[in-house]
Amino acid sequence: MKVVIIGHGSSGWTTATTLRAWDRKCEITVIDPKHYDAYHPCAMPYAIGGLLEDETPLKESMNYKRMNINFLRRHKAMKINREDKKVSVKNLENEELFEVEYDKLVICTGSIAKYPPIPGADGKNIYALKWIEDSETIRKAAATASKVVVLGASAIGLEVATELAHRGIETVVLARSRIMRLLIDPDYAAETVKLLEEKLPKLKIISGIGIQEVVLDENGMAIKITTDQGDFECDFVVAATGIRAEVTLAQEAGIKIGETGAIATDEELYTSDPDILAVGDCAETTHLVSNQKVHSALATCCVRMARVAAMTLGKPGKAKFPGTLNNFIVPYIDLRVGSVGLIKKAAEDVGFDVLSVKIKTHGKPTYMPDAKELYFKILVEKETGIILGAQAIGPDSISDNLNIVAMALQKKMTFQELLEADLCYAPAVNETIYPVTMALEMVSRRLLRK
């Protein structure tokens, strides 16, 4: 079997290496335009903020020769010929054009950063954080900057903003709506802003602002952002206004694009073409709680999809990808914010009657010197008691609590079933009664009161 993989991000390399583990004989060819093998995009803010000296540790070399995988580095897939089952490829080093045959094709073309649709957004010093080169550019610009504006309050936008502010740079985040609008509820968004601004005096987050223009100087450099709440001077701008699935090749080949703008796939990750799969940021899937179509651009989802795609090819019928919970956690210096499942509005929009319970506690017993405050919220459906989602703000231990809920969501557990969970405890690690358990006890008192 000849398998061609277009793209070599998290989904591409996971597909290639997992497939090789399942099938030692198939011919695997990977096509990718980068001049290095792979990189870890989620860690780029650490280089920008100075935790890492530079981006070198984020680049990874793949031992594909040993795995007998044909890696066409610095090559670009130009066209998919579905009728002949060939991919047209350009060698970016010498412009040579040639074709690669496939029996099965896996599209892992990822996503593209979006820039805000405002005048001046094409300024020379306006950077989106997508590629390792972007991280290098922002890190070097930050070395001499005193004022930075971040447009958009996405999770990654806030992460870059907090890293810049932590470096001592006056950093302003400007957003049309509240922070992480689709990821956390308004009350937790407001609490996050409060905690971040208290922690980082150089950081200012302004939501609900009308951004009008990026003012450029005669050299095309951004020097100021004009808004309906005044002007904000800057040495450079970070555009964190979202991404879109990169579906150009698939669209030109006549492959079905889903309602989210990503490539439509089934549970085995096949597209509308029975010999072509799509994985990662470019692929559409289903939300496990709402059952609605979603476009997930999270690394964890990409890797899970890739594992299933590899098994679809190497062990047909042995694995399916039912969908995603779009779970996320993001570090803002030493504060973590995370969410699993649905937020309240999303749950209500699909018809759930939601009970929301939140608590404020600590990640460890208060007699421990490093105990930190922890905010935890859980959402359940009132009639059935089925858990719908959870959110948390606090120290590292929020990930334990959120992951517990994530497992419960995948099994469609009720709050009573999750209350039966038998969990680990040590004072230096966590509370005797986990925050998730405290919240579930409150749910129990509310729903079983009658």
Image (cartoon, rainbow, N blue to C red):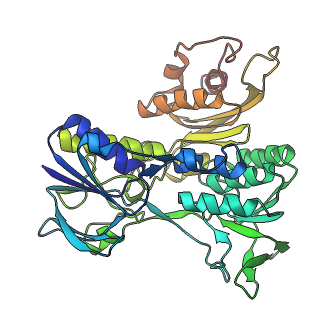
Q: Quadrant of the C terminus?
A: top right
Q: Quadrant of residue 389?
A: top right
In this orientation, which residue lies closer to the viewer: 92 or 329?
92
Regarding residue 395, the answer to whether it shows in the image is: yes
Regarding residue 321, the answer to whether it shows in the image is: no
Image point 67% across, 83% down: which residue?
119
Please give left or right for residue 64 compared with residue 427 in the image: left
Where is residue 15 shown, x and y percent of the image? Answer: 31, 45
In this orientation, which residue lies closer to the viewer: 169 or 52?
52
Image point 79% across, 22% down: which residue?
370
In this orientation, which residue lies closer to the viewer: 227 or 139?
139
Reply above or below: 369 against 300.
above
Please give left or right for residue 248 compared with residue 188 in the image: left
Image point 80% across, 64% down: which residue?
145
Reply above or below: 314 against 216.
above
Reply above or below: 140 against 3.
below
Where is residue 214 shown, x and y percent of the image? Answer: 73, 79
Q: Looking at the image, which residue sits at the far front?
A: 94
Q: Quadrant of residue 6?
A: bottom left
In this orientation, which residue lies closer to the viewer: 91 or 125?
91
Where is residue 14 shown, x and y percent of the image? Answer: 35, 43
Q: Looking at the image, which residue sits at the far bottom?
A: 218
Where is residue 63 shown, x and y percent of the image? Answer: 34, 42
Image point 33% across, 73% down: which residue?
94
Please give left or right for residue 397 compared with residue 291 in the image: right
**Number of numbered discs:** 0
Please give left or right for residue 333 compared with residue 346 in the image: right
